[in-house]
């Protein structure tokens, strides 16, 4: 079957990408300045470690092995989900990530929801009322949305919804209400971009011959846009939204920090600030994996929206 | 009620980047019910624009003047709901470029049946039955299999028959066939001729055939309109217009046919930015008189019953 072969091909091409990601994540650790052993032992800042201590930690971290051996050992551990321990807290990185992942997931899914509903919705409206006042107003609105920086919007939202009207919590996680502002501030600019992409993509389809034919059948404007133009227009939009979703699954760092959400993004940010390399390494690996998985998902979704892949392009 | 399509003073202009372009100018004619009328002319002569204006299928940049009367309504000015109820049901289109006229991400079945269901939601089963019958009549042995396909799974000739079926789905009173032989080889042209002949015999003989294919027009049409640079230069019964042409342009057009020795008309069709004061064929005309450059001739009756837009036939 064409579909199985298609998916198989995609999966095969992903294997070298995955290996590349692990090598990059590993090299990141080798190339960073400073000796990790020394860094672990001098965290408190005033005790000078003895040579004996240094030898013990070096041995424990396996740093005496040549790099390829270190890489293979690290790869084996990573594949079993064991990323080692944080330099700073000494806690297991994988269990910390598992604890934080749900927050990031919730924000990502909600932001994606905002983007799909509002982005596609506004885009369809603009395309359907092209060049009218509706289109003009929404076009200005989306330009504003896509040019607002996320952190600035986050601060503005806190000021309005938390300080002024006291409707929503400003910091920490206390249920669904806590997710609204972080998700929207993550989604806002992407809503603008995807609305404009949807508009141009639909207008592109609306200029085609089959649209004139659909109108000549007597179809209503709504049916022409939704049933005829949208399916074809979805293909480029889907690619864009897929990579966006992968991006926010990696943790919307700034938003998580501003709103005090204990997700993956704030974990990575803390790790960067503290030079906590194993955590950064695990984070790089995680985001790489998410990107690869998202791309695979997009490729599979193509099968749904593009029959040319599903049935194979073949004329008799 | 009058089921002729009567066109009075139709002028279509397009707003473009470099000003107004007149595509069709002051067309007056009656498309008689029960007869096939051919609109012939070179590419860019405005014949498709004239055909599409009847169904209000021109892009928004078109500025339309004049009237197009059908059953008491001026089709150029009726409300959107009225024109929708006429499209496909009263006057149907058999579009040009078959493969581009079908939506490549939707199955043939829905594209055919929606031509009926959009006018009456309850007729789903009838629509399907109608599609099966028509497909069978147009040479598809297994209609159900064809209806499951997408347009890219079929050859150009098959798609050509599909769009003919599409035009007939709701048993329209009128058919507008737009360039049905454009870009087809001689075998497919023969097939199109058979199809149109079949439609005229079994479905409806009220047809407007837009074509640059003079042979096809000669075989099928009862009446002919010759368009040149947006103006109708000659109109009358096919036998007269093509075997006894009156207007110098029609004479040239007939003589330029391969079967008549392929004598080309010298010069090229003028650009139409801004209207010409005189006859627009004047720069290429061998019989041009002084007055031709100064004023546009009216349509003068000729002895054979044709109307020619040429001062040679001005007997006043």
Image: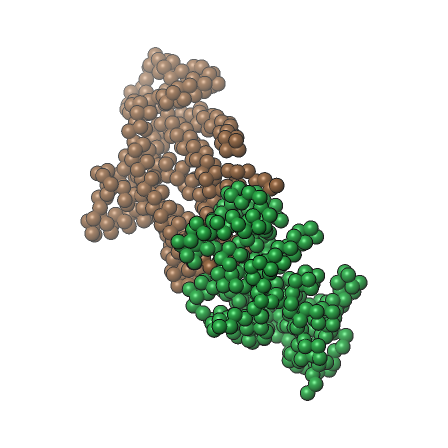
Chain colours: A brown, B green
Residue B145 seen from this side? yes
Quadrant of residue A60 in the image? top left
Q: Residue at x 36, y 50 (%)?
A: A118
Q: Is residue A192 visible?
A: no
Kindly identify the residue that appears in the image at 53 percent across and 38 percent down: A311
Residue positioned most to the right: B261
The residue closer to the viewer here, B204 or A195, is: B204
Q: Residue furthest left?
A: A166
Q: Is residue B160 left or right of residue A122?
A: right
Farthest residue in the bottom direction?
B316
Q: Position of residue A204 (x, y in %)?
A: 50, 53
Looking at the image, is B132 positioned above or below residue B31? above
Quarter holding the C terminus of chain A? Answer: top right
Q: Please state which of residues A221 and B299 is positioned toward the viewer in this rendering.
A: B299
Quarter of the image where one finds residue B164: bottom right
The x and y percentages for residue B198 are 61, 57
Residue A314 locus on image (x, y percent) = 59, 40
Q: Residue at x 38, y 20 (%)?
A: A80
């Amino acid at each position: 079957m064409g579909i199985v072969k298609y998916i198989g091909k995609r999966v095969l091409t992903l294997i070298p990408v995955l290996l590349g990601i692990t090598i990059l994540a590993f090299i990141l650790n080798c190339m960073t300045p400073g000796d990790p052993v020394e860094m672990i032992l001098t965290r408190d800042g005033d005790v000078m470690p003895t040579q004996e201590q240094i030898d013990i930690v070096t041995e424990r971290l396996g740093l005496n092995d040549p790099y390829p051996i270190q890489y293979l050992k690290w790869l084996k551990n990573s594949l079993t989900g064991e990323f080692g321990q944080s330099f700073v807290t000494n806690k297991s990185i994988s269990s910390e990530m598992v604890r934080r992942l749900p927050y990031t997931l919730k924000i990502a899914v909600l932001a994606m929801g905002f983007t799909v509903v509002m982005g596609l919705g506004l885009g369809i409206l603009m395309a359907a009322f092209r060049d009218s006042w509706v289109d003009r107003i929404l076009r200005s609105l989306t330009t504003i949305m896509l040019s607002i920086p996320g952190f600035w919007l986050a601060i503005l939202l806190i000021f309005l919804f938390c300080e002024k009207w006291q409707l929503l919590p400003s910091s920490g996680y206390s249920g669904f209400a806590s997710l609204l502002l972080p998700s929207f501030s993550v989604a806002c600019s992407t809503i603008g971009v995807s609305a404009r992409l949807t508009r141009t993509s639909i207008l592109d389809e609306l200029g085609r011959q089959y649209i004139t034919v659909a109108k000549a059948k007597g179809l209503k404007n709504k049916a022409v846009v939704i049933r005829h133009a949208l399916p074809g227009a979805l293909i480029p939009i889907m690619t864009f939204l897929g990579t966006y979703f992968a991006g926010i699954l990696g943790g919307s760092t700034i938003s998580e920090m501003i709103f005090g959400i204990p997700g993956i993004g704030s974990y990575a940010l803390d790790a960067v600030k503290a030079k906590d390399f194993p955590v950064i390494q695990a984070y790089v690996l995680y985001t790489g994996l998410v990107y690869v998985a998202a791309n695979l998902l997009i490729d599979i979704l193509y099968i749904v929206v593009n029959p040319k892949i599903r049935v194979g392009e073949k004329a008799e | 009620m009058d089921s002729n399509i009567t066109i009075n003073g139709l002028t279509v202009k397009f707003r473009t980047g470099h000003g107004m372009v007149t595509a069709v100018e002051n067309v007056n004619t009656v498309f008689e019910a029960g007869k096939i009328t051919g609109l012939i002319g070179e590419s860019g002569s405005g014949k498709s624009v004239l055909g599409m204006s009847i169904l209000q299928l021109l892009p928004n940049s078109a500025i339309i003047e004049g009237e197009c009367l059908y059953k008491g309504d001026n089709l150029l000015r009726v409300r959107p709901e009225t024109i929708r109820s006429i499209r496909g049901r009263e006057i149907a289109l058999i579009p040009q470029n078959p493969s581009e006229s079908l939506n490549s991400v939707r199955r043939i079945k829905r594209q055919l049946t929606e031509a009926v269901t959009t006018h009456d939601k309850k007729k789903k089963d009838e629509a399907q039955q109608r599609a099966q019958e028509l497909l069978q009549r147009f040479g598809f042995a297994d209609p159900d299999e064809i209806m499951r396909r997408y347009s890219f799974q079929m050859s150009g000739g098959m798609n050509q028959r599909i769009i003919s079926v599409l035009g007939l789905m709701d048993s329209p009173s009128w058919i507008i066939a737009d360039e049905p032989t454009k870009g087809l080889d001689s075998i497919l042209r023969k097939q199109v001729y058979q199809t149109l002949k079949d439609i005229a015999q079994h479905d409806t003989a009220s047809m407007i055939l837009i074509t640059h294919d003079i042979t096809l027009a000669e075989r099928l049409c009862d009446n002919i309109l010759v368009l040149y640079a947006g103006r109708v230069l000659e109109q009358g019964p096919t036998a007269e217009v093509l075997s006894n042409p009156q207007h110098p342009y029609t004479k040239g057009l007939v003589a330029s046919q391969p079967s008549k020795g392929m004598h080309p008309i010298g010069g090229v069709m003028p650009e139409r930015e801004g209207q010409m004061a005189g006859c627009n064929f004047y720069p290429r005309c061998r019989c041009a008189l002084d007055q031709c450059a100064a004023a546009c001739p009216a349509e003068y009756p000729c002895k054979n019953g044709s109307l020619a837009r040429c001062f040679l036939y001005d007997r006043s």
